[in-house]
Image (cartoon, grey):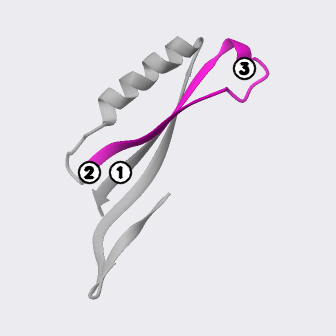
Amino acid sequence: SGGGDYTMAGASGYRMARVQADCYGATVGAAKLLARQVIAALSGVRTGKFLGVFLDAERDLSPETDRAELLGRVVLDFVIHYKE
């Protein structure tokens, strides 16, 4: 999700998007480890058209499967600022 930015002269070219990353693992610990790796890879990135990638929220949730007791899930929300 996200949207653009406007000035009185029209679109500024600045955009913001929210991206969700679901991290699943065979255990809760494995899902948390994967989440830490995703955060390390994305948080604070600034390159090219990406003006900044920032972790906004982290939630531990149950997987939406019949085998939920066997899996772990961590949901990460990132806010991404970029130029068109």
Amino acid identity at mark 3: Ala
Please name the residue shown 46% across and 46% down the image: 19
Please name the residue shown 34% across and 72% down the image: 5
Residue 41 drawn at (x, y percent): 31, 30
Q: Which residue is mark 1?
A: 80
- Element class at badge 3: helix
Residue 39 drawn at (x, y percent): 36, 30
Please name the residue shown 26% across and 49% down the image: 52
Q: Earlier in the sequence, mark 2 or mark 1?
A: 2
Location of residue 37 with respect to 2 vertically, above or below: above
Q: Say whether marks 2 and 1 touch (CB < 8 Å).
A: yes
Which secondary structure type mostly characterizes the magenta part of the structure?
Answer: strand
Q: Is residue 67 left or right of residue 41?
A: right
Q: Which residue is mark 3?
A: 68
Local packing at callout 3 (Cα closer than 10 Å; few below 14, some 14-19, many 20+) is: some
Q: Which residue is mark 2?
A: 50
Viewer-nearest of labels 2 and 3?
3
- Among all residues in the image, which is located at the extreme right? 66
Using the numbered discs, state the Cα–Cα distance from disc 2 to disc 1 in whole angstroms: 7 Å
